Amino acid sequence: MSAPGEVAVIGAGWSGLAAAVECAAGGSRVTLFEMAPIAGGRARDAGAAGEGLDNGQHICIGAYRETLRLMARLGVAEADAFVRLPLRLVDAEGIGLRLPPGPPGLAFARGVLRHRRWTWRDRFALLRTALGWQRSGFRCDARSTVAELCASLPEPVRHELVEPLCVAALNTPAESASATVFLRVLRDALRSGRGSSDLLLPRRGLSALLPTPALASLAKMGAAIRLAHRVDRIEADGSAWRLDGDPFGAVIVATSAIEAARLVAPHDRAWSERAAALRYEPIVTVYATSAGARLPEPMLALHADAERPAQFVFDRGRLGGAPGLLAFVVSGAADWLERGAAEAERAVLAQAREALGAFLREPLCPVRTIVEKRATFRCTPLLERPPMTISPGLFAAGDHVDGPYPATLEGAVRSGVAAARATIG
Ligand SMILES: Cc1cc2nc3c(=O)[nH]c(=O)nc-3n(C[C@H](O)[C@H](O)[C@H](O)COP(=O)(O)OP(=O)(O)OC[C@H]3O[C@@H](n4cnc5c(N)ncnc54)[C@H](O)[C@@H]3O)c2cc1C
């Protein structure tokens, strides 16, 4: 039988890496298994070396405290990793919500009052509603969708703020997204102190932000790292667990929910069924380049509708990447994928030429389109997510595991840290 401090972590996405680092730093002997040849899971570099592409454009916010804490522990300086900006959701005409520096609640009110396109009625309606959310402790009927929560807001506020914010944070369209989770993210962004609503835009490839330094730190702490090793099954063996024959005192399953459902099924059918029941939303990222293009902001909101798929564009040249490289993001992309990835890419490029024409001196050429069919789980009201504890010594981590956050890097990291602490008991 293995010693109690032997922990296996299955999956080297951000949750598994967070779990492995926390366990190793706490004195456990860690073995990390990852089926891919590189770590990072859904948040890693993609494409050929030097292309400067991520598996999908990611944004973080100042309220991602566990993620920032872990990066600092790994020696990643925030200023090297991110461009930090006060929250702004402005379009190509420079119009939109722009928070001035200062305490987030007050900055939000000032940003709303200065919004140039909304009428005074629009602005006061939003402030009244936001005050109501604050008074209720950012809580609402657990059955409500975001669309229901915001039904009384004027149409421009819903279309230009609520809907893009909802798909950006929950990757689920407002008509089906959980209002409870939406309010929780708003609360954390607006009520967790100075800087919590700031946008943190990666200025380096995603692998450099956490996966690569985490592997280096794990190696230094003596952890065994087994890349390109898919764990086939977990077997109970008295008070220990065996992974493909090797014994461990505790196991953290930090794989995708689908793979976790398969691995856990022999040990807890109810857990496995709950994990398997999650539904997903795709994200499409279209990378395109136009020589000399420079957008007025590193991130711009785009007006998405039935003919225009992308909600946001990022100027990777302003974020430490190749000049002229743009990343267009289509969140909640299920309807677009029904039309096919090629059609989604064509529509994004047409939308880009229409919305960004003033900034494109040279033709816009597609570089690569990345489709993540199961980018995140659909964050719907009353969703039952599988819990962290499966059996004594068998734990789950991942953005899908029950927790306060939607499927985000912060949700993944928090879940990994919590599972690691649970192995210590
Ligand atoms: C396109 C896109 C855009 C996104 N944008 C944002 C954003 O802007 N902000 C944000 O906060 N979040 C964003 N997310 C979500 C974020 O990427 C995820 O929440 C996070 O990466 C999930 O990490 P994880 O560790 O839970 O899971 P994963 O990253 O899925 O990691 C699971 C790992 O387990 C491995 N694995 C699976 N089965 C096995 C096995 N049997 N044996 C060994 N290894 C196995 C997999 O290869 C994988 O590496 C985005 C996601 C996508 C796809």
Image: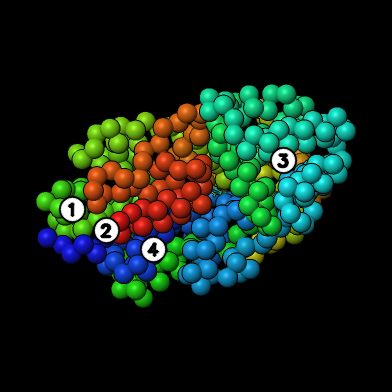
Structural distance between the alpha carbons of marks 3 and 4: 39 Å
Mark positioned earlier in the residue sequence (3 or 1):
1
Mark positioned earlier in the residue sequence (2 or 3):
2
Disc 2 marks a residue whose amino acid type is Ala
Q: Position of residue 211 (x, y in %)?
A: 45, 62
User: In this figure, which residue is indicated by the disc labeled 1?
Assistant: 241
* Residue 8 numbered tag: 2
Structural distance between the alpha carbons of marks 2 and 3: 44 Å
User: In this figure, which residue is indicated by the disc labeled 4?
Assistant: 22
1 and 2 marks in contact (CB < 8 Å)? yes
Question: Is residue 187 or residue 362 the one in the foreground?
Answer: 187
Q: Residue at x 86, y 44 (%)?
A: 114
SS at mark 4 in the image = helix
User: In this figure, which residue is indicated by the disc labeled 3?
Assistant: 302
Q: Position of residue 34 (x, y in %)?
A: 32, 57
Disc 4 marks a residue whose amino acid type is Glu
Q: Nearer the viewer, mark 3 or mark 1?
A: 1
Question: Is residue 144 or residue 214 the one in the foreground?
Answer: 144
Q: Nearer the viewer, mark 3 or mark 4?
A: 4
Disc 1 marks a residue whose amino acid type is Trp
